[in-house]
């Protein structure tokens, strides 16, 4: 298959081809999602070399097991980002001997900076990203913090409770309130 | 459930989606979810909020060398890969798994092990070898069916990193769902897990997942056992 033909296929149509070890399909898949994957890995591990390793491992994992994607459980992109996130958290934990050092004042997730290059699909992705950033930015700081520590830091709720010196129930309650608000913002964006 | 009780569950759902529950808590919640439609509905409503979090990160440009290395490896593997096999023979990570003929209710498959190398390699350089699945033989997986349920027995397992658990999955047709079973190896490298519903299952798989498990596999299977229909 020529790459130009693969480019016309949706992600869900690319995955069976990747499962059949079609490198052109994989190339298109990487070109679509490699940027956000690397950005997520970098956000979590905080170092370019480690982010490259994580991204490479994640995509090779997908190459070797692409047929395992299940369309009933979400988009290909969501599935792929879940793989990247888990591998990045793994890398963070093993490098730190568990406890990654996080800057509690790091609110880079709340920032919005345009990428150097922009395609139509990237622009659409950024609109979604902007909605999420907006929703996160409007969260009370303590809610945004527990969500970031859990999702981008890989900390459990009990670890977060220990760090912040607040009861476990408070941490979980802040997580719920924060996610509900983000979800609400997303729902509004769809109407 | 009381209003307070439900709020408690809602709090746990958020922590679960963020991967922040301890393994035991996650397993307990999964058992509750299996029988509570209200909580399942809430979980699915809340899930997009977590799924969108990675989209919020500041974009940084991936180095072009990364793409070059990836495609070099992928094209090299594609050239050496055998032709696709019939669907009944599961191919996982470049190796094939075939059921061994045996006793009526026993499926024994000698599978390969994916070393628990996720994130355990040297992350300081770009030449880290990626071990995903299928190159360290040793793990033996055995599925014993008993009516509608089954028991998965594993031996020769490596010990897991403290932040990892094993999670069992079942595949029916093309759909892979959690068997709602999280477990860890015993000291002697053995482990067992119950598969409550074997109806229509054509493959049983095990992956290493973060504590609390995952809603879908996020790594290549450590073992994959094809179940004859």
Image (spheres, coloured by chain):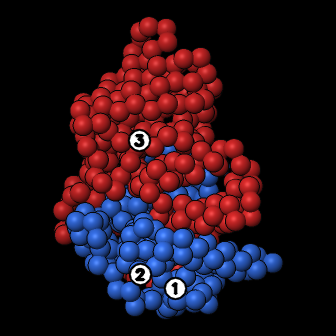
Chain colours: A blue, B red
Above or below B189: residue A58: below
CB contact under 8 Å: marks 2 and 3 = no
Real-space CA distance between mark 1 and mark 3, rounded to the nearest whole angstrom: 33 Å
The quadrant in which residue B174 appears is top right
How many residues crowd around disc 2 within 10 Å: few (fewer than 14), some, or many (20 or more)? some
CB contact under 8 Å: marks 1 and 2 = yes
> Which residue was labeled with disc 2?
A164
* Residue at x 45%, y 32% (from the top left corner): B193
Secondary structure of residue under mark 1: helix
Q: Is residue A133 left or right of residue B21?
A: right
Q: Chain of mark 3?
A: B
Real-space CA distance between mark 1 and mark 2, rounded to the nearest whole angstrom: 10 Å
How many residues crowd around disc 3 within 10 Å: few (fewer than 14), some, or many (20 or more)? some
Judge whether residue B161 can be spotted in this image: yes
The quadrant in which residue B51 appears is bottom right
Q: Chain of mark 1?
A: A
Viewer-nearest residue: B138 or A126: B138
> Which residue was labeled with disc 3?
B183
Q: State which mark lies toward you, 1 or 2.
A: 2
Whole-percent x, y for residue B5 in the image: 68, 61
Q: Chain of mark 2?
A: A
Whole-percent x, y for residue A84 in the image: 42, 63
Q: Are marks 2 and 3 on the same chain?
A: no
Label 1 vs 2, first from the N-terminus:
1
């Amino acid at each position: 298959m020529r790459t130009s033909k693969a480019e016309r296929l949706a992600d869900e149509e690319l995955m069976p081809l990747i499962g059949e070890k079609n490198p052109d399909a994989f190339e298109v898949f990487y070109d679509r999602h490699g940027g956000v994957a690397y950005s997520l890995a970098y956000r979590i591990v905080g170092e370019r070399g480690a982010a490259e390793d994580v991204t490479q491992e994640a995509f090779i994992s997908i190459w070797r097991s692409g047929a395992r994607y299940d369309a009933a459980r979400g988009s290909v992109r969501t599935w792929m980002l879940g793989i990247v996130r888990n591998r990045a958290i793994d890398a963070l934990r093993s490098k730190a001997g568990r406890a990654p050092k996080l800057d509690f004042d790091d609110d880079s997730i709340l920032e919005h900076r345009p990428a150097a290059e922009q395609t139509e699909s990237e622009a659409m992705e950024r609109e979604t990203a902007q909605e999420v950033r907006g929703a996160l930015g409007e969260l009370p700081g303590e809610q945004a913090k527990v969500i970031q520590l859990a999702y981008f830091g890989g900390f459990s709720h009990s670890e977060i409770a220990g760090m912040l010196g607040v009861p476990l129930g408070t941490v979980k309650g802040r997580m719920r309130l924060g996610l509900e608000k983000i979800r609400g913002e997303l729902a509004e964006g769809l109407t | 459930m009381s209003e307070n009780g439900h709020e408690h569950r809602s709090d746990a759902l958020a922590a679960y989606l963020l991967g922040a529950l301890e393994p035991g808590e996650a397993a307990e919640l999964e058992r509750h979810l299996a029988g509570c439609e209200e909580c399942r509905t809430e979980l699915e409503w809340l899930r997009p909020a977590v799924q969108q979090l990675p989209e919020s990160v500041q974009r940084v440009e991936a180095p072009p060398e990364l793409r070059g290395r990836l495609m070099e490896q992928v094209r090299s593997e594609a050239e050496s890969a055998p032709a696709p096999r019939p669907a009944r023979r599961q191919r996982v990570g470049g190796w094939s798994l075939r059921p061994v003929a045996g006793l009526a209710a026993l499926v024994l498959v000698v599978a390969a092990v994916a070393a628990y190398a996720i994130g355990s390699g040297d992350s300081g350089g770009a030449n880290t070898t990626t071990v995903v699945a299928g190159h360290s033989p040793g793990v033996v997986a055995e599925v014993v069916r008993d009516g509608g349920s089954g028991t998965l027995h594993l031996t020769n397992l490596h010990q897991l990193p403290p932040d990892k658990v094993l999670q069992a999955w079942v595949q029916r047709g093309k759909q892979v769902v959690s068997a709602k079973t999280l477990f860890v190896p015993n000291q002697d490298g053995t482990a067992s897990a119950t598969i409550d519903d074997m109806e229509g299952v054509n493959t049983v798989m095990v992956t290493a997942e973060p504590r609390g498990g995952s809603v879908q596999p996020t790594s290549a299977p450590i073992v994959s056992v094809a179940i004859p229909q």
